[in-house]
Image (tube, helix red, strand yellow):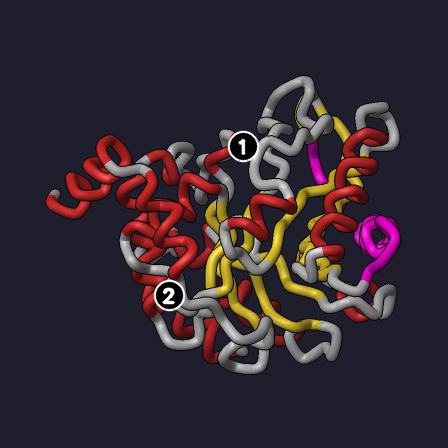
Amino acid sequence: MRELADLLAVRVHEPERITRLAAARTRPDSLAGQTGRLLLVAADHPARGALRAGADTLAMADRWDLLRRLRIALARPGVDGVLGTADVVEDLLLLGALEGKVVIGSMNRGGLAGTVFEIDDRFTGYDAAAVERTGLQGGKMLLRIDPDDPMTAPTLEACAAAVGDLAGRGLMAMVEPFLSHRHEGRVRNDLSTEAVIRAAAVASGLSWTSAHTWLKLPVIDDMEQVLAATTLPVLLLGGEVGSDQGLQFARWKQVLAGPQVRGMVVGRSLLYPPDGDVARAVDAVVGMM
């Protein structure tokens, strides 16, 4: 593949080009989104070792295939940008796929999937200074609150500091909160109405200001109560690949009517749809927006 060879040549012989391209990149005027709502494609899963999409446990393991799917999605009208770790963002930058796009850097990827230290979610990706330095529009953090795991406390503290650091630079702080528990040794997110409301309430109050905080929340049955719990902008979490994509899309469309809902962040559901047609899946979601 010529493009892959060219990308590798830059990384080996001219890595400083990444910095130059980041500085020269055309940046979006706002976070409003082309449709009035923001649609971002998420691609930060691999950095946590989370490679599953649907029944395929290694769906996201093929990086060039992932980049191919991301480029298809980012080229569709109505797609505003991407959420990713530096490796993915820089590959897309080198491939010329990020001009005019909203780019959100993933910050804490240290809570590796399936590990005993998963709740201790260290900031191993971007920090606020790097988000600003590389010309990104914000930073995203995952906040899982496990009442039985004492490592929740330092994760809360780190997220609060990141929210403040981003806000001080006028950058979006995207917080994805869950109330979580361990079941048979694995972390499971509680998607009951009460749990999602409690998690959203905690995330809303992090740091010295919420002026630049956006919440990334899962779509559950009783979203009316969840959305009533906050005045912050909400981005809907696409979540896992659904076996019935039509039903999944219908739920999203209904929730998008809420005034707090300012868009969606969708990863595997768009990149690995059941029929394999990335463009079709993307266009269907853009139509809802």
Marker disc for residue 99:
2
Residue 39 coordinates in the image, percent (x, y): 52, 68
Residue shown at 15%/39% (left/top)? Answer: 5
Q: Is residue 80 left or right of residue 116?
A: left
Q: Establish if 184 lies above or below 39.
A: above
Q: Quadrant of the C terminus?
A: bottom right
Residue shown at 27%/53% (left/top)? Answer: 95
The range drawn in magenta is: 187-210
Q: Is residue 122 left or right of residue 288?
A: right
Residue 189 coordinates in the image, percent (x, y): 72, 40
Marker disc for residue 48:
1
- Say which of 94 and 81 sits in front: 94
Viewer-nearest of labels 2 and 1? Answer: 2
- Say which of 47 and 2 sits in front: 2
Residue 20 coordinates in the image, percent (x, y): 36, 51
Q: Amino acid at mark 2?
A: Glu
Quarter occupied by residue 281:
bottom left
- The answer to whether residue 277 of the structure is visible from this angle is no
Q: Among all residues in the image, which is located at the extreme left?
A: 2
Residue 83 coordinates in the image, percent (x, y): 51, 53
